[in-house]
Image: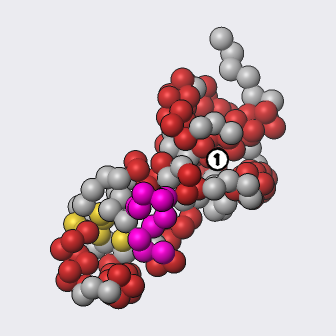
């Protein structure tokens, strides 16, 4: 598996190839079969992967906090909802949710764990979404994800082998 600190550079080197593979999948992959392949590789690779040793996702994104989670999250941290918002959050530009004020995420701790524990948002729990359905329709976002998550990068590389994909030079 690629090291977390090298994934962005390696993904950039393969950017053209990855975009061509995405186009290939759009024209050749069966949606249900591709979802099964993503899910299978997700389960296999995450079975032995310790995300707390990477946390590129926490380092390279602001955390997104749904408005309906604010009271619960504030209570978990032992502060009021108003304090929670003032200390950690800003309103997202186009919807009613919030995001952390900083990148890396304000809830990321030095040991790789999240200050919100089990209360962390679903978007964080589900990242990199490689076990979610409808991967065929979200392959552009997968291309973004493989620049951040070593497991997502490896899934895409293994899919290339599965499909016997070769870039024509």
| Residue under the point 64% across and 47% down | 151
Compared with residue 138, is residue 69 higher up or lower down, i.e. above or below?
A: below
Region in magenta: 108-117
Tell me the residue at 51%/77% (across/down): 118
Work out which quarter of the rendered image holds the C terminus and state it: top right
Quadrant location of the N terminus in the rendered image:
top right
| Above or below, 160 relative to 152 | above
- Where residue 133 appears, as percent x and y from the top left, is 65, 62
Residue 133 seen from this side? yes
Q: Residue 29 appears at what percent x and percent y?
A: 74, 44
Q: Going 32% across and 62% down the picture, which residue do you hit?
A: 106
**For this rendering, which residue is in front, 109 or 43?**
109
SS under mark 1:
helix
Query: For residue 76, which quarter of the picture?
Result: bottom left
- Identify the image quadrant of residue 88: bottom left
Q: Mark 1 packing: few (<14 Cα in 10 Å), some, or many (20+)? A: many
Q: Is residue 20 above or below residue 140?
A: above
Is 110 magenta? The answer is yes
x, y percent for residue 72: 38, 86
Q: Toward the viewer: 91 or 26?
A: 91
Q: Is residue 141 magenta?
A: no
Q: In the depicted view, which residue is nearer to us: 159 or 126?
A: 126
Q: Is residue 161 left or right of residue 9?
A: right
Q: Going by the image, does 38 lie left or right of 122? A: right
Residue 68 appears in the rendering: no
Residue matched to label 1: 151
- Residue furthest front as drawn: 111
Instruction: Identify the image quadrant of residue 164.
Output: top right
Horizontal and vertical percent for residue 24? 67, 33
In the picture, measured across the screen, residue 152 lies left or right of residue 106, that is: right
The type of colouring in the image is: secondary structure
């Amino acid at each position: 598996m690629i090291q977390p600190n090298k994934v962005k550079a390696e993904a950039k080197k393969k950017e053209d190839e990855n975009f061509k593979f995405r186009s290939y999948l759009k024209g050749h992959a069966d949606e249900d079969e591709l979802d099964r392949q993503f899910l299978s590789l997700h389960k296999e690779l995450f079975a032995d992967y310790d995300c707390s040793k990477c946390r590129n996702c926490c380092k390279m994104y602001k955390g997104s906090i749904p408005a309906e989670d604010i009271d619960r999250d504030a209570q978990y941290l032992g502060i009021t909802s108003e304090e929670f918002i003032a200390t950690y959050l800003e309103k997202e530009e186009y919807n009613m949710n919030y995001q952390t004020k900083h990148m890396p995420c304000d809830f990321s701790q030095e040991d790789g764990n999240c200050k919100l524990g089990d209360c962390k948002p679903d978007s964080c729990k589900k990242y990199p979404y490689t076990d979610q359905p409808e991967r065929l329709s979200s392959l552009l976002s997968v291309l973004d994800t493989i620049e951040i998550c070593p497991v997502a990068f490896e899934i895409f590389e293994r899919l290339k082998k599965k499909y016997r994909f070769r870039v024509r030079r």
